[in-house]
Image (tube, rainbow, N blue to C red):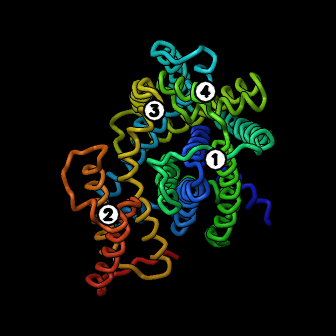
Amino acid sequence: MNKKVIVVGFMLFAIFFGAGNLIFPPKLGFMSGEYFWPTIIGFIVTGVGIPLITIIAGSFDEGGYKTALRNVHPIFSVVFLTAIYLTIGPLFAIPRTGATSYEMAVVPFIGGPSQLSLFIFTLVYFGITLWLAINPSKMVDRVGSILTPVLLVSIVLLVIRSIFIFSGNAHTATDTETFTSGSGSFFTGFTEGYLTMDAIAAIAFSVIVLKAIKDKGFTKETGLLKPTIAAALIAAVALGFIYLTLGWIGNHYPLSADQLAYIESYGLDIRTYLLTHVAHDAFGNFGKILIGVIVTLACLTTSIGLIVAVSEYFNEIYPKISYKVYVIIFTLFSLLLANQGLNAVISKSVPVLMVLYPIGMTLVLLVILSRFIPTPRLSYQIAMVLVTIVAVLSVLSSKDIGLLNLPLMEQLPLKAQSMEWILFAVAGYILGLIFGAKHPKIKFQ
């Protein structure tokens, strides 16, 4: 295999290998019990497969998904991308980095969380983020390029050691309220994969990723698709291995009743608790300290990178406000939300992701179809409008939100699997083909 392809593969891996993502598989493994395998496969599909397919489809056109979104409507393009940048930025992903770092690097060493210690830590954390994001330099990239391999090596060593320790353990008890069957568990894992936010981030950053691939020597003339697919497979194998093994460890980690009571009494996030205590059981206090420090530094570089990316995007679409003002606003907003705690940040992101992911996955499907089938613009428009409406109504009428009383939404096919949107995407695409048959066609090369 071409050495450049391998380099690009690990570059893609580094882009999607966020320290915050490490906390999701252990909890999923712990809760799924006997349904571990369908659950983790579902998680890997959305946490690994869809983001990398999104990157591959984004290489069909040099404009990435901005071109595809403009086929729907320029205003829709701005609104959707703005929603994505806010989601992977100050609303959820950036606050999550600070809250995760606090629970992994501070809470295990002070006996329990407190609002004061959370505020002090996040004040320092986001102060550093602000300082470095206002004057972005190559230093952050260099630190990130060092931390990613160190974190990867640490996780691999943790996995190997943990497999030896826990291989004799039976799987954990199944959370029977959530995991009731193999197929149902697959779709539970599938929607849990939304929490990584990697697929929607891939839509926003597809052009940046494409540029990085070109910087490695690949061009439109020599072909961008094949090396992108090969690199994506490398990244997929590496990410899949980490998620699978961390999930397996969570599935065999024996949390006692006292530990579960402690987690509940302090309102801790079981995700960070599991990862921290697995590190402690594997390597003692050194392991707990090491994983806390490395994850915190890795989260910090992610936080800085996201603040820079989001601020640059908003400065591009509304330049009357300076880049530095955007950085200050988004950093302060992230600080405020991080102080709600990790559980709150993650739970509040779920409804938004349940809207954005169906829209994003429909967009990717349309781009892939447009490579093989000349597709009228009307197919994009009808499919995206229908999916957006259904996704929004499904969330607003859900039990967790309950703003609308729409019993009909519960009767939609595939609603139980949170896939009701897919029939509307197909119907919209077909209607567009019929009524837009005489219109100009879109075809990605």
Q: Name the N-terminal-most of marks 4 and 1.
A: 4
At horizontal 24% and vertical 45% (from top left) the residue drawn is: 402
413 relative to 202 in the view: left or right: left
Q: Name the N-terminal-most of marks 4 and 2.
A: 4
Say which residue label 2 marks. Answer: 387
- Give me the C-alpha separation between circle 2 and circle 3: 29 Å
Q: Name the N-terminal-most of marks 4 and 3.
A: 4
Say which residue label 4 marks. Answer: 104
433 relative to 312 in the view: left or right: left
- Give me the C-alpha separation between circle 4 and circle 3: 13 Å
37 relative to 380 in the view: left or right: right
Query: Where residue 399 sits: x, y (%)?
Result: 29, 47
Q: SS at mark 1?
A: helix
Q: What type is the residue that disc 2 sits on?
A: Val
392 relative to 86 in the view: left or right: left
How many neighbours does mark 1 have within 10 angstroms: few (below 14), some (14-19), or many (20 or more)?
Answer: many
Query: Where residue 394 sits: x, y (%)?
Result: 29, 55
- Which image quarter: residue 90? top left
